[in-house]
Amino acid sequence: MDNNSNLIKNSIIILSFFVIVTAFYFLIGQDKTKLPSQLIDRPAPTFKVQDLLESELIRSEADFKGNITLLNVWASWCPSCYVEHPFWKDYAKNKDLTLVGLNYRDTKPKAMKFLREQGNFFEWNLFDENGRLGIEFGIYGAPETFLIDRDGKVRYRHVGVVSPEVYQDIFLPLVEKIKKGF
Amino acid sequence: MFKPLFTTNTSKLIVIILFGLFSSSAIATIDTYEFNDPKLEARFQKLIYELRCPKCQNQNLADSNSELSMDLKNIVYEKLIKGESDQQILDFMKQRYGEFILFNPEMSQSNALLWGGPIIFLVVAIGVFLRWYSNNRVIDNE
């Protein structure tokens, strides 16, 4: 009987230990790619940058207003962007959102070469040569994709490649929510 | 019979290449920030040790050579030269990258477990030890 109660006590202690460790794992050991953006439910940062293809055009956060926008951060030096890009090609065929590129820390000739070879499916591209706009958006690198609503508010940020599955499971429900007025 | 993986000449070449790689990274870490005021330089050093490289695992801006860290270091430098306070610079970083960018995050509701965790562990450990100790003492007396 005493042995049994000791066994129960020890089991409770061991179980509690595992519960605490698991809680720590989920609360602290987060995947850094899952860190939420500081911009969620806030207006996109204010900026003024050159359009990649039309240098004389200066783009700003005001350009996001009126449409639901997917802002994709890409660069010619980013291997994952080459993996992701075919998705945007398929997306562009029947898209219902404005697809905008943010060319991050790149040179114009290399960025143009990327778009020539991989295809340009973006309606327009922001040219962030020195990475300062990227910092305003709090980005970690490329690729990243922001979902911006009609009021210019950031509703979601995805770090990493957007695949058909990611779009279907994560973006689409949010897009539907935005369309209904959030 | 043991057969060496590389010939002597290949081994030498590998060593030379490795030296080359390490020396280039050593060159890359030399900072080129110039300060007229040593106090400003001390504040710069303190800030880049306090700020975490957002895309690296457990590295501060001072130790990281990533391009993002370089950009953030440049911003710290520019803001110091412009006369901004340490708190203004930390707030700027926090607004964009959250608490995660601070190596010593301020205590908040979301990280309360992180701060309180070690104390909880200590209390549990002492409790378990005292229980074990009192149980054993009873057995000794018998």
Image: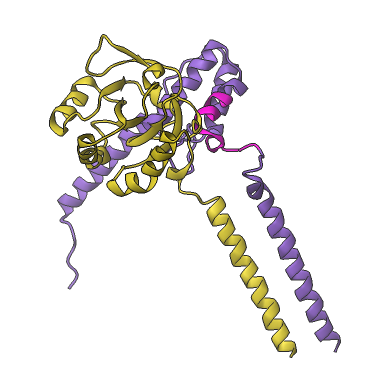
Chain colours: A yellow, B purple
Residue appearing at x 45%, y 30% in the figure: A154
- Taking depth in this image into account, of B24 and A161 the one nearest to the observer is A161
Q: Count of labels shown?
A: 0
Residue B9 at x, y = what percent?
Answer: 15, 50
**Residue B64 seen in this snapshot:** no
Q: Which secondary structure class fits the magenta region best?
A: helix
Q: Quadrant of residue B21?
A: top left
Residue most extreme to the left: A117
Above or below, B99 relative to B93: below
Q: Is residue B118 left or right of residue B62?
A: right
Residue B68 at x, y = what percent?
Answer: 40, 30
Q: Is residue A176 left or right of residue A93?
A: right
Residue B13 at x, y = what percent?
Answer: 19, 46
Q: Quadrant of residue A52?
A: top left
Q: Is residue A21 magenta?
A: no
Residue appearing at x 64%, y 36% in the figure: B106
Residue A50 at x, y = what percent?
Answer: 31, 14
Quarter of the picture holding the C terminus of chain B: bottom right
Q: Quadrant of residue A102?
A: top left
Residue appearing at x 50%, y 21% in the figure: B76
- Taking depth in this image into account, of B39 and A164 the one nearest to the observer is A164
Quarter of the picture holding the N terminus of chain B: bottom left
Residue most extreme to the right: B141
User: Which residue range is magenta in the image?
Assistant: B90-106
